[in-house]
Image (spheres, coloured by chain):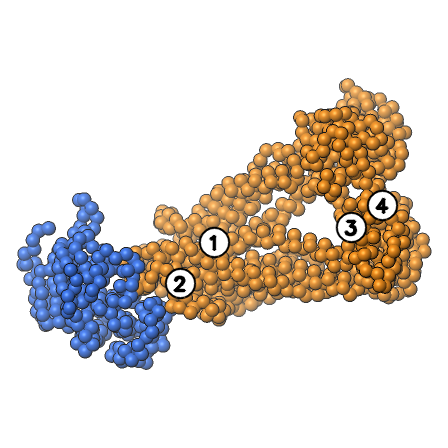
Chain colours: A blue, B orange
Amino acid sequence: MSASDGVAARAVDVWKKYGSGDAAVTALAGVSVDLEKSRFTAIMGPSGSGKSTLMHCLAGLDDVTGGEVWIGDTKVTGLKDRGLTELRRDKVGFIFQQFNLLPTLTAEENITLPLSIGGKKVDRAWFDVVVDTVGLRDRLTHRPTQLSGGQQQRVACARALVSRPDVVFADEPTGNLDSQSGAEVLGFLQRSAREFGQTIVMVTHDPNAASYADRVIFLKDGQIVRELLSPSAEEVLETMKHLDDVAVPHV
Amino acid sequence: MFKATIKSLLSRKLRLVLSALAVVLGVMFVSGSFVLTDTLQRSFTDLFSSAYANVDVSVAPKAEKGKEPVPLTPQTIADVKSVPGVASAVGDVQGSARPIGKNGKVMTTSGAPRIGFNWTGTGQEKIRDGKAPQAEGEVAVGAFLASTGQFKVGDEISLLTLEPKKTFKISGVFEYAGGRDSLGGELSVAFTEPVAQQLLLGGKDKFSGVTVTAAQGTSDDALRDAVAAKMGSGYDVKTGAVLAKEQADQINEGLKFFNYVLLGFAGIALFVGIFIILNTFSIIVAQRTRELALLRSMGASRGQVIGSVVLEALVIGLIASIVGLGAGIGVGALLANIFSTVGGGNLHLAGIGVPMSAIISSFAVGMIVTVIAAVLPALRASRIAPVAAMREAATPDRPLTKITIFGAVVVALGGTGLGFGFNNGSLPLIFGGILVAFVGVALLTPLLSKPMVSLIGRLLSWSMPGLLGRRNSARNPRRTAITAAALMVGISLITGVSVVLTSATKSIEKLAAGQIQTDLIISGEGQMEGMPATFKRDVLTKVEQTDGVGSAFGWASDGVLQGEDQMFAIAPTSVPAMKQMLGLKPKFGDIAPLKDNQIAMPEDLASEKGLSVGSTLTLQLAKAEPQTFTVGFIWAKTQVLQGALVLPESAGKGFRSDQIGQAFVQTKPGASAVDVQKRIEPLFADNPEITVQDRSAFVKQTTSQFDTVLLMIQILLALAILIAVLGVINTLALSVIERTRELGLLRAIGMRRSQVMRMITVESVVISVFGAVLGLAVGVALGLATVQALKDQGISEIGFPWVTMVQYLVVAAFVGVIAAILPAIRAARLNVLDAIAYE
């Protein structure tokens, strides 16, 4: 099986268990999902629902206990470290909640880091577009310590986009930001999906953040339980409140 | 608080091991040197008590300072024999006898004497094979000489004594009590008495001493008193036990020097160790900022925080001392064994001993050094504000102004100490000055590290991992600086020594090329027995008559005493020839042949002694009564014959040997030096200790000893560098832990494991090369200072060991690569997810 056209990343019956025997914890219990290209997808769920694990598995940061993960035409499951490293370098972009930048590098060097690691040339035109979109033109020579939290996260966004990856994974990207900076970052992610056709997958527990997404997937106890398309923040909040009512098959 | 400290210590075992290792190595050297010297001392004491086992009382001519003892006569022996209580009194003849091996070369030992004696049959030597020497042409040889030279009974053996080569037939091989081949690796030959007297003491009826045994019922002490009373004040009468102790003490005095050298290197090792421990604790305190602040916010006092860091240091110091002591005992035993088999040749070891001094010094040194190194970090830890627990852990860059000013002051202090040390010739001041200067330079390094590291790093940062590595090494100037400073110490000491030796070599070469107008130099190799080899005066005459020789002169040399001052004196065969060939220029008076009561000297010696032409001084020669001389002329200071007194040829008879020790030959114009050398060499066929060399070979031989010195210092200082490498590993390992999340991020966005490793390696190489560059700079400065101070001692030229210096730089880069291996593997193996989540 391969990911068909229009799908940037795909999970097929993915299981993830930690530990063994009585102490075994099932984090993912047979998750299957297609993440369409050029879409901004949010993964939501309460703590312990498995949303971060799902993202880690999709991004090749963690291996799966069962099932398959694909990114584009590449089967992630079964890749060795070298293959995974190249996958992350060439096909995936990351935005983390905190500690996103290298303190020894300038903003510009941080943005182009994935390209320089891979020994690739920077597409200056695209770089300019990305930098102008995140509004960092006058901050390029600054070190991370000289930037505010919101600016740092925008540098991280620019870095994730500059190599035109198949998918950008964002793990609680606004978790450490004030609402104003958070809104800027989310707005930028939304625009990159809409204007540049960038596929974005974001894990969040903030209904407001999820409302920027085109599609919201709800996880509970390691399974996908609901899905909303272009919801408002209120709809997301409402759904979250009633997740407990959803019957989950016992695993 | 105690429990918290121990827990935190145990949770970081790697850190414990690495920082303790530096102390372990230092302590190992300390205890090792004590164990080694103790073992050797007891072995030598054993050796001499068995050497004098057969001697109850010994009578020898009284040794007077600066005078050669007068040999005893048969009458003396008869006198001793007549003392009541004497069972036997046997005359001993002893002197230097160097056997020539089957390869035609003079056999050597590494320290033990090469001796000849008269076979009396009453000593402790027992014939193992064959029989005792009975005829003039017969000798018996010691079993050790027989086995190392592969001689057996019936073989011929050639010997060098006071006379040139003489060949004997081996009548027997003897051994010592207990079947031992030798007492301590000496090469010994027994002659018949008349032969021994002629060859070893230079005349008939001469004895070097009398061995006396006591009759039944007479104690050694009583016998000694009785003999001493009879013989009067002209003789040294001692019991065998006292003699054994005196000889052992004399050797042990020499071993002390050995001990000092080893302890000196232990000191350097520990000094470097302090840098590393200081660095380790600083990093640990920085990493534990939040933990310590939490303790503070819960009510721990500053004292308790200091206490917790110092306690951690004490525990590390204690463990390191125990391990270091154990390792030191092993090293001491190993070195003692090497010494007994290779070095001293067959010394019978008296069992490895661990003296109390080794144990006490190990614990004292190990724990004190560790605690000293931990004091600064502990004080810093105590200044952590409780509120830091709430903040993001961040170590702000503190300004370097204070530390830089302080460093400059300390460097100036060290330099001043060094200057005074050189002026007064005071070793403690010199070494103290060097150590203080090192500390000062180390304090200055953080300031230097920024520009230097970026300069060095530029060479390596052509790729992103390289750039990151370079930026990382510039990240914490203090940490990089201290790590590099540890490496600096070893490299600068080696470089300093190299600069001095290169300058000395260059000076000697220049001297030989310019001043010495001589084509061939005839000289004897120095002997273990104290005097260089010499040759007879009539051989020099034959050299002068050799076809192609223009002129030749030589001299006999010896130490002479003026009051308490020991001076070096020569008695040349021709003053005009010496003036011409060595380029002497008159300062006061004319350089003319000396009358029998005249002497000459260089101007600096004359001014030091307050002498001018016409002054008199009284000298004690070894074989003459004190004699008063008048200064005949004083020559202008040159690099040759420094501090030498020139005596008239006739005074040479008062030397221990008035044979020629060194001679210089000038060839006739047009004659080839090589041809003349070939014609002269056969004259010394019977004297393989004498070599005829052209000027350049002579220079090479003179300077070749420097290479040996340098090699030894390099080997010993390699330890300091090894410890510095541990420091680099330690710093990198701690940095890797500190940057776990960064590494996780890099891996997450696609950095390959090999790239991570390259990043760490570049950081390591940058630090190491920085340390080497510092070391080379400081070493050159130290070397130049020493050369400057030794200007009056004949080092007139300045030379830099460029090749060696480049080698050190390459070695440093290589060391950087090696040091990076483990931390790099550790960094590359990090689990990406765990690393990102790392707190």
Look at discs 4 and 3 and give the one toward the viewer.
3
Q: Which residue is mark 2?
A: B759
* Mark 1: secondary structure: helix
Residue under the point 84% across and 48% down: B683
Say which of B415 and B521 sits in front: B521
Same subunit, labels 4 and 2: the answer reads yes
Q: Which residue is mark 3?
A: B691
Marks 1 and 2 sit apart, C-alpha to C-alpha, by 19 Å
* Mark 2: secondary structure: helix
Marks 4 and 3 sit apart, C-alpha to C-alpha, by 19 Å
Q: Amino acid at mark 3?
A: Thr
Q: Give the mark nearer the N terminus: 4 vs 2.
A: 4
Q: Amino acid at mark 2?
A: Met
Is the C terminus of chain B in the top left, top right, bottom left or bottom right quadrant? bottom left
Q: Are marks 1 and 4 in contact (CB under 8 Å)?
A: no
- Image location (x, y in percent) of residue A202: 19, 67
Q: Are marks 1 and 3 in contact (CB under 8 Å)?
A: no
* Mark 3: secondary structure: strand
- Please rate how many residues cluster around mark 2, counting C-alpha atoms within 10 Å: few if below 14, some from 14 to 19, many from 20: many
Q: Give the mark nearer the N terminus: 1 vs 2.
A: 1
- Number of the label disc, if any, that sits on residue B657: 4
Same subunit, labels 4 and 3: the answer reads yes
Q: Give the mark nearer the N terminus: 1 vs 3.
A: 3
Q: Are marks 1 and 2 in contact (CB under 8 Å)?
A: no
Look at discs 1 and 4 and give the one toward the viewer.
4
- Please rate how many residues cluster around mark 3, counting C-alpha atoms within 10 Å: few if below 14, some from 14 to 19, many from 20: some
Marks 4 and 2 sit apart, C-alpha to C-alpha, by 69 Å
Mark 4 belongs to which subunit? B
- Number of the label disc, if any, that sits on residue B726: 1
